[in-house]
Amino acid sequence: MAYRDEVLFEEKVFKDPVHRYIHVRDRVIWDLIGTREFQRLRRIKQLGTSFLTFHGAEHSRFNHSLGVYEIVRRILTNFKDQPNWNHEERLLSLTAALLHDLGHGPYSHSFEKVFNLNHEEFTKQMILGDTEINAVLSRVSDEFPQQVADVINQTYHDKLVVSLISSQIDADRMDYLQRDAYFTGVTYGHFDMERILRVMRPLNEQVVVKASGMHAVEDYIMSRYQMYWQVYFHPVSRSAEVILSRILHRAKQLNHEGYQFKQEPTHFLSFFKEDVSLNDYINLDETIVMYYFQMWIDEDDPILSDLCARFTNRRLFKYVDFDSEEDPNAFEELKALFEAVGINTDYYLIVDSSTDLPYDFYRPGEESMRVPIYLLKSDQSLQELSGASEIVESISGKKRTDHKLYFPADIIKQLPNDDQKTRIKQLLGMKPNI
Amino acid sequence: MAYRDEVLFEEKVFKDPVHRYIHVRDRVIWDLIGTREFQRLRRIKQLGTSFLTFHGAEHSRFNHSLGVYEIVRRILTNFKDQPNWNHEERLLSLTAALLHDLGHGPYSHSFEKVFNLNHEEFTKQMILGDTEINAVLSRVSDEFPQQVADVINQTYHDKLVVSLISSQIDADRMDYLQRDAYFTGVTYGHFDMERILRVMRPLNEQVVVKASGMHAVEDYIMSRYQMYWQVYFHPVSRSAEVILSRILHRAKQLNHEGYQFKQEPTHFLSFFKEDVSLNDYINLDETIVMYYFQMWIDEDDPILSDLCARFTNRRLFKYVDFDSEEDPNAFEELKALFEAVGINTDYYLIVDSSTDLPYDFYRPGEESMRVPIYLLKSDQSLQELSGASEIVESISGKKRTDHKLYFPADIIKQLPNDDQKTRIKQLLGMKPNI
Amino acid sequence: MAYRDEVLFEEKVFKDPVHRYIHVRDRVIWDLIGTREFQRLRRIKQLGTSFLTFHGAEHSRFNHSLGVYEIVRRILTNFKDQPNWNHEERLLSLTAALLHDLGHGPYSHSFEKVFNLNHEEFTKQMILGDTEINAVLSRVSDEFPQQVADVINQTYHDKLVVSLISSQIDADRMDYLQRDAYFTGVTYGHFDMERILRVMRPLNEQVVVKASGMHAVEDYIMSRYQMYWQVYFHPVSRSAEVILSRILHRAKQLNHEGYQFKQEPTHFLSFFKEDVSLNDYINLDETIVMYYFQMWIDEDDPILSDLCARFTNRRLFKYVDFDSEEDPNAFEELKALFEAVGINTDYYLIVDSSTDLPYDFYRPGEESMRVPIYLLKSDQSLQELSGASEIVESISGKKRTDHKLYFPADIIKQLPNDDQKTRIKQLLGMKPNI
Amino acid sequence: MAYRDEVLFEEKVFKDPVHRYIHVRDRVIWDLIGTREFQRLRRIKQLGTSFLTFHGAEHSRFNHSLGVYEIVRRILTNFKDQPNWNHEERLLSLTAALLHDLGHGPYSHSFEKVFNLNHEEFTKQMILGDTEINAVLSRVSDEFPQQVADVINQTYHDKLVVSLISSQIDADRMDYLQRDAYFTGVTYGHFDMERILRVMRPLNEQVVVKASGMHAVEDYIMSRYQMYWQVYFHPVSRSAEVILSRILHRAKQLNHEGYQFKQEPTHFLSFFKEDVSLNDYINLDETIVMYYFQMWIDEDDPILSDLCARFTNRRLFKYVDFDSEEDPNAFEELKALFEAVGINTDYYLIVDSSTDLPYDFYRPGEESMRVPIYLLKSDQSLQELSGASEIVESISGKKRTDHKLYFPADIIKQLPNDDQKTRIKQLLGMKPNI
């Protein structure tokens, strides 16, 4: 039997708290899960620093990747009797779903920004390069690795396959909303996925949803909106993210300046140089990063040491709402005051912004080509979701941005009492008597 | 206001997936949570190696510690109007609940066995030694640290306080059963805690349960029984535990032999010597352990390298049921065969046993003085639980033991085909044609 | 001890699937639950005809009334330490919560329209008239019954008390959304009530919500919106409601015409005359109504018999979307065609409309004075909800109406095949070949 | 296409709170659900009088019947690839599952005892007699009605089909345990049905369970045990049942004596004569029974009136544990005292017993041939469940009986204070000062 068609002697089942059970029957999928690159995802948290806000959010990308696979598996089971679905794409779809986050590193957001990386590029390298993953995929066929990479990269010719894991209502989003809600414990993030799966229909280039399921989709869009503002953009998690990115900056800067580390940043060197090999990338998981941060608490550089201690022991920055347009001088004044009392504003006075676009529909000429969600009406015509749903219409295309200013309130409290301190506290909205 | 009576300006609330919300009002509790020793519990998994079996079980002891605190807080709210409860013990009870697992290290079970440690001893040291925890506790009163240590050590004079966190139906067990069920996703582990809390009554030396709540307690005992055999003693998790303990043995042995490590086992040295300072102990969390294991994959010693790769990439040992009494010669024969084909049986042929005693009642003269659960009848008399419940009676005092033999099936499969291999596979119940 | 202060020897607890437990400590509450008027609520379904769409929705108003009481009890427990709350109003608030739906009859909506009744008027009479309820309330004080009636009637002087059960985020709505979601099994209707209760604050005339809880309130508003359109206005339930109201019309009409019933409509006579005594009203619960409907299946009048059989055996009308403005002549043509083939359009061709106003804020000069929801900001100022929430703003004050046309597809299918039938089917969007 | 193979144009889906969705694709099933005999099950509560203890338990047998159908449907989906399953039996299995409770009347337990009825006999008649059900079944084939009756009656030749709905781990039990837990709101009754379904295997005469699923089955058995004692045999529900059966006795007795009813017991006459036609049986649902009970409150006979008022308004009897063997004279003395103060002991002093046999295994020679549950081991041998599970073994074959004595405490409290009253209260364990 061809390797691509091999099934396990007995179906393997993973107990999953979100989908109850995850079923694996294909040997290819089973072998992929066993590779070291896939197992590495156990050492990368799904929600980065969110566990410092929501203590339950300690789950890994390994969890999520299995979940996305399982949702696609269920979608395809429903598609079995559908006319527009090409059954030859089944294994490719399942594989792409399983591997879509393979290239994520630790705290991707900060790492990518500080070191100018792109996790999608590394996903591609892990699939096409000299890896255990590639060895498994190549056994399927010579073209298979490239096809998998194309689906994840959204360049695969069959857009229907692409849309299963990359669209506004794909298996990726459906898994993470539910999973992150489950582990954080928030009540948002729940929607009737079983119903959505039942009303999904394959169509030329995209999965569409029967109009009778519109309210379930509305509920999903609202879940997404709530999860973004309640969980993903929570200002406390962003405080940790701010500190994290300052640590990376500081270490890079110190290395650049020739600072002598007690704990040499061996694993980081190629990151500092922005010339990261696939192997270096694979080796730098969250365990390694956290090891360095804990070691660096003992460094002589007071900024690196302090920031690492803050991150490790959760002594985060406080924050205030901040809109530079409302009061353009305040920030400059604060900066001057900070420097005057000896606080380095590159590391201790940081503006952070979050932006979400909860649902977007296609507008010709725009760069971002987010494919909208279409409803399939009983007369077989299509209607764009926001045209049918007032709720969705009300939030479509509306970017919402939140700006916050982060600072170490503990350091400010310990300043000697003088006019500068009073003014700083006033500008930051800190209570005067504390 | 005395520090012990200080309350926060506004109650702090943690979102918790198991208890929905965890409420903190006392400044002492809030300050304890902020210490580096307590934050360190985020880097120690509640269920050790179980996440390799149940991928959701990635939650930390930090989670669990907050949960135990919250349950005790709820119990004491119910006790407010009860005659036998001494309200002066409130802060002590909450503090002991929060800190009861403070001294746990990474993968405690294996570490304690291999390095001859005792996590309870370290809990005591963290409470009484030169720590941030001790600094907070000492602000309450000079005696407070010792009192907290006594409650956790079960030597405190007020046995009622002790029983809140150390009895057969304490806050510790009630939290971990529910929490571990939640994160693994199994359906066992659920019981009606709200009802149990409502029928708990403080009595001289112990918390008892109103007889009307007997069935809820039965359900709790059964949950415990199921969780032990379905989750805690799962043979796959034990396989990972076996490998882990072999790694520790091997590293210790190599160090003893003067082996030159590429990655020096700095953090482990005092463990190898079985002379661990409090600070060494605190510094060795799971992040550090996993860092070394990942580094040691590149060591020259083939056994250490192989075992570390197995643990990191989840290439576990297979197992068979094994009862040395049934077939005393089989093990010796296997051992000889393994050595003959060049497999070191100290590291690759391991017997592991698990034993549980689901519920025990007091039997005079026995060493283990597990306090039984008493039901409070409407005539105010007490009845021991197993005397009232057939279900509990049926499992009381019955030790159940499970023996398994662990071995690397992958290595055996790669042996050259000969009589030795055939015999090994036969003895291990491996399919002949694989 | 005064009756109003009496507590039960031991707290009574009801197991409730929605709130887990309902706690009763006041003797007054306990005695009210035991009255025949309150027990009668067991014989009136909470959701009327919805059980014919959602088979789980067989729960009664008894259920819901206990739930509203429990929510108010929890709110007041939270209010204990709040400055603006007058503790003297506790028993009054609990009592009004328990009794707010007391005057509901069977299928209130249809009965009230057909017989020109007002359930609020009967609630008042049950509280003030010669009832077991009144006997209990009068034991509290002479004024107590009137006070309870005033709170339910929204005329009580303390608007804060009124707002607990009559506002846009009151205990009534919070219970029924969750309860109806639970029994129907839909995924909508869930929101974080525990959080909302925790951020509620009593203020002069109204309960307000701390701004930090805004997203929980948004979620509640969205739940409400979804429940209305997914459950409460479900077109199949409305089909049953249409038939029900036609039965009542027909029986009234027949009685008016002097028709000789086999089963005399004894219980209905005063309803037909629109002169209903309190006792007649109390006696007509759903059991009695359904008894008559089942008996009337055997009546000689073919319309009454057919409609009663339809309702009893769930042979409902089909429906199509219908907008009289779009095609004003279609309805007239249909009517003529129905009459031409011998179908009485007063009973068999019915337009039904549903309208919802998901959230409304105060607009001066408008008659409907729906009190808006206010957020309490950290600077103690108030902000109207739709001013803070884009989502809520998007649906505020927007009436949405849905018109459907109901008809007996089965009868039409059995018509002889001719042009009239073809045209009817065409107008009603029925498939031609059926 | 043959009627038996017809599928609906589009699958119909029922929203179900327990199984989420119930799927119907076969036209035969859809048509059966639409019959008046099946719709009648909406007017018969699944748990009889239990709603007077657990107010959520207002769900009907209609609910449960759909649930059993759905579970069998899922089992058969899993059986698709199994060698021992005869696919020709699919429709028969689904139909028997759907209809297995068809013959249940209102409060079956009491009715059957008082009027000497057998609901299984009426199920048979409804399937084979002149009913809408029979009309549908006969369209499948001439033999189909008899086959369905045989499966339900456990006389069908293919015991595998029978065991799906009649065994110790059948779809019937699995549905009602979960459903009754859901609606009552108790935490018992939950088990991992998805896992049990996955490990079920068809074998010659019975469904067996793979040994790896043993713990899930244990959990199911324990759920059953807990539900029996916590819900089904709850002493308060039994109090209502006692009153109900006394009402039936009294009405029968009065009719026998020639008593002139104000509300003639028309629907009951053939029941009194124990000569009930199928039509009489079908017509007497709970609505009708409750109508009579409410009417009979106004009867002149004080016993009938009082008992009907008690049942309608939930003024139940109190109870004490009662063991006639422990104190054989107490009951006789009570009886004499009751009669002496003018209380009719036939109606007001009732002993009621409940007995459960949680799990039974086959013992040769015994009459009750309850088929045990077998585990299928990996070597394909079978092991009886209680041989593998200590927990199950501990409760196997152990009958547990609970005797209670029911009496009207309210009447006794109102007796004039004298020695007789004092003695009665003493014997009944009533507090002296009440």
Image (cartoon, coloured by chain):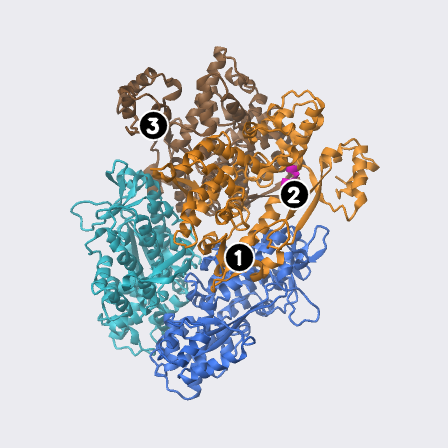
Chain colours: A brown, B orange, C cyan, D blue
- CB under 8 Å between discs 2 and 3: no
Q: Are marks 1 and 3 on the same chain?
A: no
**Residue B250 can be seen in this image:** yes
Q: Position of residue C69 (x, y in %)?
A: 33, 57
Of circles 2 and 3, the one toward us is: 2
Residue corresponding to mark 2: B235
Indicate the secondary structure of the residue bearing disc 3: strand
Task: From this view, report whether residue B240 is shown above or below residue A408.
Answer: below
Q: Disc 2 to disc 1, how far (Cα)? A: 34 Å
Residue corresponding to mark 3: A403
Majority secondary structure of magenta residues = helix
Identified by mark 2, the residue type is Pro
Q: Position of residue A256 (x, y in %)?
A: 48, 12
Label 2 marks which chain's residue?
Answer: B
Residue corresponding to mark 1: B374
Label 3 marks which chain's residue?
Answer: A
Indicate the secondary structure of the residue bearing disc 1: strand
Q: Disc 2 to disc 3, how far (Cα)? A: 50 Å
- Label 2 Cα crowd, 10 Å radius (few <14 / some 14-19 / many 20+): many
Location of residue D344 by image quarter = bottom left
Q: How many marks?
A: 3
**Residue A185 can be seen in this image:** no
- Span of residues in magenta: B237-241
- Residue D130 within the segment the image draws in magenta: no
Indicate the secondary structure of the residue bearing disc 2: helix
Identified by mark 3, the residue type is His
